[in-house]
Image (cartoon, rainbow, N blue to C red):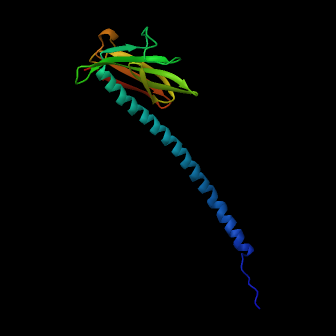
Amino acid sequence: MSRREDGFTLVELLVAITVLGIIAPVMVSAIVLGLKTTAATTGQLNASHSRQELAAFFTTDVQSAVSIADETSADTTTCMSAGETLVGRLSWTDIDSTGASTARVVTYAIVTVSGDKQLVRHACTGAAMSTVTVVHNVASGNLDCTSTAFATAACATAAGAKLTAADASGSWVVEGLTR
């Protein structure tokens, strides 16, 4: 009978450990860099999504608006929930094909939910209110009533509105004109 001599020699084992010692730190560094890049990219995509969503809602709301109010409005309860901070409110009346009218109010407000400061959009029709979070981790939000040239104007005579919002990625402005 012959005896099998399968296995590694001490030299082969030392060479393998040395090569592994050279390759392992490079692989770990690549994985760590990949994870950091993924987190940064996710943050940038979330910020971009917030900007796009806010722009889509806000410009449409301003185009429909007949009445615009900023954060100085005395009315801090219409189309809002308790504990929120008013940023701005837009209102109008829709008339359907039968001639029936429906009052609409959209409020932009800042609220803190589980430690996340959010810019939310409330849309109210009668007693029904729907809410969409348009910006997470918002630092600030401000609505200015504007003229057609987007210069600051009195809300009673405003032809448009400008919403300035800021988050960890920076600040941006969304503007719209009424029809």
Q: Is residue 12 above or below residue 81?
A: below
* Residue 152: x %, y % from top left: 34, 14
Q: Is residue 55 above or below residue 23?
A: above
Q: Image quadrant of residue 5?
A: bottom right
Q: Residue at x 41, y 17 (%)?
A: 88
Residue 154 visible to the viewer = no
Q: Image quadrant of residue 64?
A: top left
Q: Residue at x 32, y 9 (%)?
A: 156
Q: Nearer the viewer, residue 152 or 132?
A: 132
User: Which quadrant of the figure contains the C terminus?
Assistant: top left
Q: Is residue 17 above or below residue 76?
A: below
Q: Residue at x 56, y 53 (%)?
A: 30
Q: Is residue 62 above or below residue 156?
A: below
Q: Is residue 17 left or right of residue 158?
A: right
Q: Residue at x 34, y 11 (%)?
A: 155
Q: Is residue 117 left or right of residue 22?
A: left
Residue 54 visible to the viewer = yes
* Residue 163: x %, y % from top left: 39, 22
